[in-house]
Amino acid sequence: EVISQSGTRLRFRIFNANGATTWGILDTRGEGSYQLEIIDEASLIQSLEFDAEALRRTLETEGRVNVYGILFDIDSANLRPGSGKILDTLADVLKSSTHLRIEVRGHTDSTGSAAHNRQLSMERARVVTEVLSLFGIPLDRMVAIGMGADSPIATNDTEEGRQQNRRVELVAID
C-alpha cells in the first residue's frame, strides 16, 4: 500500500501473511542512486517499563519529560496499536496531579520539509490531547504544540538519531 508520494520520496507498507507490517521509504537520489529504509515489525521487540510516579516527579521537578512509545503510522497522525498503555499511564498521572497543566509537544525528525514536519507534529500533539481527554483529562489542562524538527535531541544523520527525535514531550505549564 502506498501511503504517500511526494517529489522523490515514496512511503509504503506491506502487510505480511504473519500479521506484521513492513514499512518502507524509498528516496531516489538522482543519477541512478536511491536510499531505501525498511522497518519490519516482526523483528521489533518492544519492551518499555513506564513508571507513572517517576514521570510525575520528573514533570514536577524538571518541568518536562520525553515520552516514547506513543506510536503513529509513518507520516501520519493515526495512532498505532501499542500506544494505549502509555497513554493510560499519562492519564493516570494527570488525574492524580490535578494542579498540573501541560503542553503536549509533538516532534519529528528532519526528513521532509519544515512546513510538513510542523503540521505533522501538530496533528500528532492534537491526537494525544484528544485521546487523553477521552481518559477524562480536561482539554483546558493541555495545549497541543507542533515543534516539527526544530528541537532535535540527537543527530538526524542516522536512523537511531531520527528515531529519538520522533517523540512526544510533555512540558509543565506554570
Image (spheres, rainbow, N blue to C red):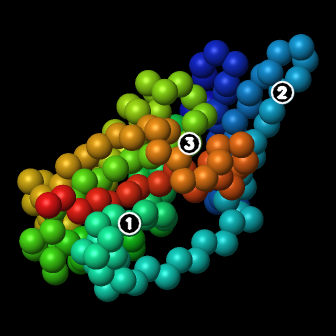
Quadrant location of residue 94?
bottom left
The answer to which quarter of the image holds residue 65 is: bottom left
Residue on which the image places disc 3: 109
Under mark 1, the amino acid is Val
Dot 2 crowding, Cα within 10 Å, few <14, some 14–19, many 20+? few
Position of residue 111 measured from the top left corner of the image (x, y, whole percent): 60, 34
Q: Which mark is residue 65?
A: 1
Residue appearing at x 53%, y 25% in the figure:
113
In the displayed structure, would residue 89 be above or below residue 82? below
Badge 1 marks a residue whose secondary structure is: strand
Q: Position of residue 66 (x, y in %)?
A: 43, 63
* Residue 146 visible in the shown view: yes
Residue at 28% over, 76% down: 61
* Residue type marked 2: Tyr
Q: Residue at 58% of width from left, 36% of height from top? A: 110
Q: Residues within 10 Å of mark 1 (few under 14, many from 20)?
A: some
Residue 82 x/y as whole percent = 47, 66
Q: Looking at the image, which residue is at 20% across and 49% down?
A: 143
